[in-house]
Amino acid sequence: MTAPRVRFAPSPTGSLHVGGARTALYNWLFARRHGGTFVLRIEDTDVERSRRELTDQILDAMTWLGLTWDEGPYFQSERSAIYLAAAGRLLAEGKAYRAFETAEELEAARKAGEAGGKVYRYSGAGRSLSREESDTRAAAGERFVLRLRMPDEPIVVQDAVQGRAEFLPEALDDFILVRSDGNPVYHFTVCVDDVEMGITHVIRGVDHLPNTPKHVALFRALGAEIPVFAHLGMILGPDGKKLSKRHGAAGAEEFRAAGFLPEALANFLALLGWSPGEDRERMSLEEMTALFSLERIGPSPSRFDHEKLTWLNGQLLQAVPPRRLLALLAPFGLPARDEGTLERAARLHLSRCRTLVEVSQSLRIYGDDPSEFEAAGLKKFGKPELMKSLRALASRLASVEPFAHAEMEEAARALATEAGVSLGALAQPARLALTGSLASPPLFEMIEVMGRETALRRMLAFADRIEGRTGAS
RNA sequence: GCCCCCAUCGUCUAGCGGCCCAGGACGCGACCCUUUCAAGGUCGAGAUCGCGGGUUCGAAUCCCGCUGGGGGUACCA
């Protein structure tokens, strides 16, 4: 294949939805795979709804995901001259025509049609206007839209993912290219730009498939070659309905804020609809690039499985180098400890976490002393009669040298044997005292990282509290 | 309403006529490991391939119908 040119063309009317992120990813992978060019184009022809901040947000999200573009971003709002020139050409060639009906008239006709149980179609009135009449009325200042003269024969769309789809001419009417205010409409700008930018493959969501015959007709009218189409199945929510904020997160930014890694989201999204074909699950962008092909994309819609994303995130999280981990964790909050301690702590807690938020939360115990203790833990181990051995453990730990987990464990085992109790009976109250919870990394490794002073203070404070010495129960 | 697309374990999927009484992954269960919780390891349950017709010696794989789901039907993108 000669170097393909693909594009991702989001509309800045919302943040980057995961469906859009996946479309961007596939385009990116395809371009990378074949040594092509990935173009970014912002479709902001809807001046009412487009917002600059949203464009920035989309660009941010893409950068975060690692989907950098080779060209652009181009803004359609800045390319009016190109569209108008193309419109002029189509009009001159008779491939498009002026239609003078007002939006109100069309609306009324549509209403009437529906009321009569008929399918509304544009009457085609403008089609039969003579060129002279059209020119005269336009020159007289009458408002008009530009419509494309659609062909009378069926249009077949050959799709790389969905297969063949045929559209009958009666289902397609002469759609509007340019609004009466002179602004071009989406279908028109897309095609003009795709031609102008030399796009060879159009990879986008299936929601665009019904629009594709219009585009095919336009490409032909424009005298351009038809690009290869690849329409991706929708990404649905867990309930099979369209994925939206109702399902929790739906935008890339939201997943970022929820502590997901960009490589995990990308990996997960890649697998929604595409399969590497060799039972692979975990892949880097590079690995995906090497394996990517349009042929291995399935046509059916898929559901967004939050559980699997979380699992994948947990998997990839384990592989993050300590340095980067701390940098990633910073926005989520880190206790005031030196970097070395934080790195050791993170390493200790990592396998118990699946998101950055979880890591951040679990690292809180290296900051403030716990003030709350889990109820089940207090019920089981918050008994005054257990405090004697907790104090005994504390006093052993006070003198252990070196202050390392192996030595501590040895001392604790000795103490347990002397007292005739299990190591667990000694460790659990200590764990509760240290973390407020019954779940934590191995006790002595944790204490080693936490520091002797902190550990002893917490154990003694806990014993005091349980024995009622400080009032609180 | 009309048009278009889709349909394999709960979920993501492998499968492109015989290798499949269907393989992998998430999730779920059990066990092992173990000072707790995870991680990890092992094993297991889980789809008569939506339904009904064809085609074929042979169909999850091809064709048709139905059902279900999704999308489109704008001077939105």
Image (cartoon, coloured by chain):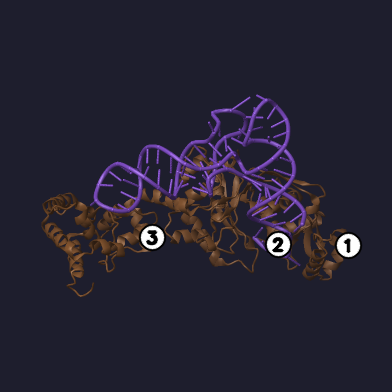
Q: Nearer the viewer, residue A439 or A192?
A: A439
Q: Nearer the viewer, residue A37 or A325?
A: A325
* Residue A454 - label: none
Q: Nearer the viewer, mark 1 or mark 3?
A: 3
Earlier sequence position, callout 1 versus callout 3? 1
Where is residue A328 drawn, in percent x and y? 38, 57
Give the Cα separation between the discs numbered 1 and 3. 68 Å
Is A49 placed above or below A200 here? below
Where is residue A133 drawn, in percent x and y? 88, 64
Q: Please give left or right for residue A266 compared with residue B60 in the image.
A: left
Residue labelled with disc 1: A132
Where is residue A304 drawn, in percent x and y? 53, 53
Q: Quadrant of the C terminus of chain A?
A: bottom left
> For numbered disc 3, what is the local secondary structure?
helix
* Residue A184 - label: 2
Q: How many marks?
A: 3
Q: Residue at x 13, y 50 (%)?
A: A417
* Chain drawn brown in the picture: A
Q: Residues within 10 Å of mark 1 (few under 14, many from 20)?
A: few
Is B65 placed above or below A150 here? above
